[in-house]
Amino acid sequence: MSITKNVKETKAVGKYIRLSPHKVRRVLDQIRGRKYQEALIILEFMPYRVCSHIKQILESAAANAEHNDGLNKNQLFVSKAFADKGPTLKRFQPRAQGRAFPIHKPTCHITLGVSEL
């Protein structure tokens, strides 16, 4: 028999972001389970291009929690953070002797969930 506590989780999703999901997951692993303010500081000083996108989505999730669910931003933590693969843009690079090499430009969908401590 387990006792479950009603925990409100609010999420925000960024779709079709032109970054590889593999590179996004590298950063998401660093902020998963951290407090909201701590995660913002980590994202501010990490040297990766994806950090600005994740920071924007995290701020959106916190604003959703505050506005829609009435939660306090100071009491939030990152409860869920994952990146799914999106559609791949396919392009061709012309090469020697009339050949064409494919170029794959990956996209991803980033989902962040925040809950109250």
Image (spheres, helix red, strand yellow):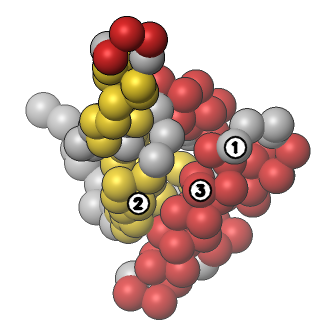
Q: Mark 3 points at which residue?
A: 53
Position of the C terminus, as image quadrant, is bottom right
Q: Is residue 115 shown above or below 81?
A: below
Measured in 3D between alpha carbons, the distance from the residue under mark 2 to the one under mark 1, in whole angstroms, is 15 Å
Q: In this view, does 31 lie above or below 43?
A: above
Q: Are marks 2 and 3 in contact (CB under 8 Å)?
A: yes
Callout 1: SS? loop
Number of numbered discs present? 3
Which amino acid type is marked by label 1? Arg
Give whichever of 61, 65 is nearer the camera.
Answer: 61
Relative placement, left or right, of 7 versus 56 is left
Please tell me which residue is depicted at 59% across the width and 56% down the height of the picture: 53
In the rendered structure, which amino acid carries the disc numbered 3?
His
Label 3: how many residues lie within 10 Å, few (<14), some (14-19) or many (20+)? some
Q: How far apart in space, not on screen, are marks 2 and 3 (Cα)? A: 8 Å
Q: How crowded is mark 1: few (under 14 residues within 10 Å), some or many (20 or more)?
A: few
Q: Do the residues under discs 1 and 3 have CB atoms within 8 angstroms?
A: no
Please identify the residue farthest to the top as the structure is shown: 97
- Is 84 placed left or right of 59 in the picture? left
- In front here: 46 or 115? 46
Residue 14 numbered mark, or none:
2
Please indicate, yes or no, whether residue 24 appears anywhere in the rendered image.
yes
- Report x, y in % for residue 73: 63, 74
Q: Please tell me whether mark 2 or mark 1 is closer to you in this view.
A: 1
Q: Which residue has dot 1 on it?
A: 49
Q: Position of residue 16 (x, y in %)?
A: 35, 54
**Extreme front residue here?**
97
**Image-quadrant location for residue 72:** bottom right
**What secondary structure is found at the residue carrying circle 3?**
helix
- Position of 18 with respect to 97 (left or right) is right
- The answer to whether residue 39 shows anywhere in this view is no
